[in-house]
Image (cartoon, helix red, strand yellow):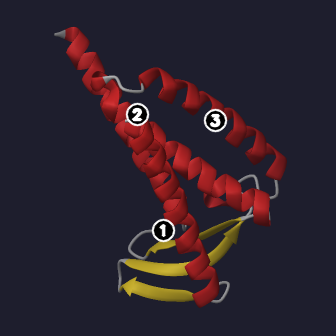
């Protein structure tokens, strides 16, 4: 599973970077393109902070957090690898590492993260594919921990 997980990690980071590149090339900064009217638009933004643009301009902070987070996630990934009962957590960690790497790469290379997905039906921060990987990864880990607790209880 280790090789498959590493391939998935690389593919997810590549997808993130390709989407960001396509948005930068095809949509003017601040521009918007409806994908599903009333539901989802692509909006080209630069974010040098976190969600809701908090901690703007704190590149050093995000660099330290990313390196520490990758180390912690790598440790847990290594300890879960090839354990049948922890496959969900392992997959969640792969997604979280891919999201962390995708956004960290942007910050290192450009000093900001490219965000593009805008939910038109709710006031929610514009986000990117890496953010989605992070969110889904956290959900998978929560589900995996819950299921592991249930297994231990029985």
Give the residue displayed 58% in from the left and 72% down from the top: 20
Residue 74 position within the rendered picture, expressed as x and y whole percent measured from the top left: 57, 31
Q: Quadrant of the N terminus?
A: top left
Q: Are marks 3 and 1 in contact (CB under 8 Å)?
A: no
Q: Are marks 2 and 1 in contact (CB under 8 Å)?
A: no
Q: Are marks 3 and 2 in contact (CB under 8 Å)?
A: no
Residue at which label 1 appears: 123
Q: Is residue 19 above or below residue 97?
A: below
Give residue 69's mark: 3
Give the residue displayed 70% in from the left and 61% down from the top: 106
Which numbered disc, 3 or 1, marks the residue that appears first in the sequence?
Answer: 3
Q: Is residue 62 above or below residue 25?
A: above
- In terms of depth relative to the viewer, which is nearer, 66 or 61? 66
Residue 70 position within the rendered picture, expressed as x and y whole percent measured from the top left: 63, 37
Q: Is residue 104 above or below residue 151?
A: below
Residue at which label 2 appears: 90
Q: CA distance from mark 3 to mark 2?
A: 15 Å
Snapshot quadrant of residue 154:
top left
Q: CA distance from mark 3 to mark 1?
A: 28 Å
User: Viewer-nearest of labels 3 and 1?
Assistant: 3
Label 1, residues with CA under 10 Å away: few <14, some 14-19, many ≥20: few
């Amino acid at each position: 599973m280790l090789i498959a997980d590493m391939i998935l990690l690389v593919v997810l980071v590549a997808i993130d970077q390709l989407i960001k590149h396509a948005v930068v090339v095809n949509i003017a900064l601040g521009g918007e393109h409806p994908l599903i009217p009333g539901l989802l638009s692509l909006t080209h933004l630069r974010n040098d902070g976190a969600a809701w643009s908090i901690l703007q301009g704190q590149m050093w902070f995000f660099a330290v957090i990313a390196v520490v987070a990758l180390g912690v996630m790598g440790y847990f990934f290594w300890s879960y690898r090839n354990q049948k009962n922890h496959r969900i957590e392992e997959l969640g960690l792969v997604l979280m590492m891919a999201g962390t790497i995708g956004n960290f790469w942007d910050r290192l290379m450009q000093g900001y993260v490219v965000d593009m997905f805008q939910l038109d039906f709710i006031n929610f921060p514009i986000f990117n594919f890496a953010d989605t990987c992070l969110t889904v990864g956290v959900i998978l880990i929560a589900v995996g921990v819950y299921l592991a607790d249930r297994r231990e209880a029985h």
